[in-house]
């Protein structure tokens, strides 16, 4: 199986913690040069040090705040002037705060749409020309199982994640002829700071301890535990590899079997 990413360059967003960082680590282990993108420069510096360099990889970072589209645009354009070749794009951005959808303000939808769909669109437009030139491109969007089974209490997130999934499927139809794939990885409950926030929210709303809430959630997962970030990252890395060249337009759940739909 060809998993070799030597000589390939990957741009990984939201990559100072959780699934984003775990994905960057896995891509580097396969030989890729990895550029981390996030807003905290101190954490970016620390994260770069976690990446494998045993195959001569050169890793970089870009400081960009995904809540500010113009900031992202400027930061990425400056980066591409210095490093124009990008073979892999991993889109990963934190979700909005939870709550019933009927209580969500229109502004929350607009802000989240900007952070996810509009930023993803700009990033794809920025790197696809290089992918076409190289005849190799992998776009992987880390979103959520909510695109298959909406999650109660995450109304805004459910809505926008679904839009990203549809955007990605459309890209796969348009770009496949150029050797570029576009796929979604759908984490279920994964041990990250995001999950901790969800447990806290449910603990407060249900008047239960976080431990009780966690046990209830785990009981609905066939493997009876939360996923680890590195397990999700393994799926991301595989989809970025040469071995996954004919896999495109899919939404792959990595959730311990929790999603009930086919």
Image (tube, rainbow, N blue to C red):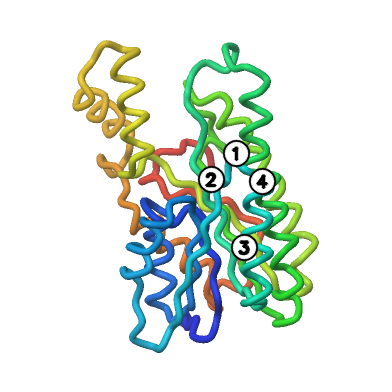
| Nearer to me, 36 or 230 | 36
| Earlier-in-chain disc, 1 versus 4 | 4
- Residue 158: % across, % down: 57, 31
Which mark is on residue 211? none
Q: Are marks 1 and 3 in contact (CB under 8 Å)?
A: no
Mark 2 → mark 3, Cα distance in angstroms = 13 Å
Name the residue: 72% across, 54% down. 122
Crowding at mark 3 (Cα within 10 Å: few <14, some 14-19, many 20+) = many
Q: Are marks 4 and 3 in contact (CB under 8 Å)?
A: no
Q: How many marks?
A: 4
Specify which label sits upstream in the sequence, 1 or 3: 3
| Disc 4 residue crowd, few under 14, some 14–19, many 20+, Cα 10 Å | some
Q: Which residue is mark 3?
A: 139
In the rendered image, residue 3, in percent from the top left (x then y), is placed at 47, 79
Residue labelled with disc 1? 161
Earlier residue among tags 4 and 3: 4
Of labels 4 and 2, the one closer to you: 4
Query: Looking at the picture, does residue 104 appear above or below residue 140?
Result: above
Q: Which mark is residue 143?
A: 2
């Amino acid at each position: 199986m060809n998993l070799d990413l030597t000589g390939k360059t990957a741009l990984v967003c939201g990559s100072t913690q959780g699934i984003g960082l775990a994905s960057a680590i896995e891509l580097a282990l396969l030989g890729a040069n990895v550029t981390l993108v996030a807003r905290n420069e101190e954490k970016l510096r620390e994260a770069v040090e976690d990446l494998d360099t045993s195959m001569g990889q050169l890793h970089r970072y870009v400081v960009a705040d995904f809540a500010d589209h113009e900031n992202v645009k400027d930061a990425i354009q400056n980066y591409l002037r210095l490093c124009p070749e990008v073979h892999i794009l991993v889109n990963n951005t934190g979700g909005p705060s939870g709550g019933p959808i009927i209580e969500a303000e229109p502004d929350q939808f607009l802000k989240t749409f900007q952070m996810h769909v509009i930023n993803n669109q700009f990033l794809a437009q920025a790197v696809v020309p290089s992918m076409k030139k190289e005849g190799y491109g992998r776009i992987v969007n880390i979103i959520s199982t909510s695109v298959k089974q909406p999650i109660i209490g995450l109304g805004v997130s459910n809505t926008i994640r679904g839009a990203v999934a549809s955007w990605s499927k459309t890209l796969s139809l348009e770009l496949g002829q150029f050797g570029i794939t576009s796929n979604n990885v759908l984490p279920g409950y994964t041990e990250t700071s995001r999950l901790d926030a969800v447990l806290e929210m449910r603990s407060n709303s249900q008047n239960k301890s976080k431990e009780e809430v966690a046990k209830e959630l785990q009981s609905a997962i066939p493997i009876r535990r939360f996923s680890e970030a590195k397990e999700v990252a393994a799926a991301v890395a595989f989809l970025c590899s040469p071995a996954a060249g004919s896999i495109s337009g899919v939404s792959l759940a990595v959730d311990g079997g929790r999603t009930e739909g086919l």
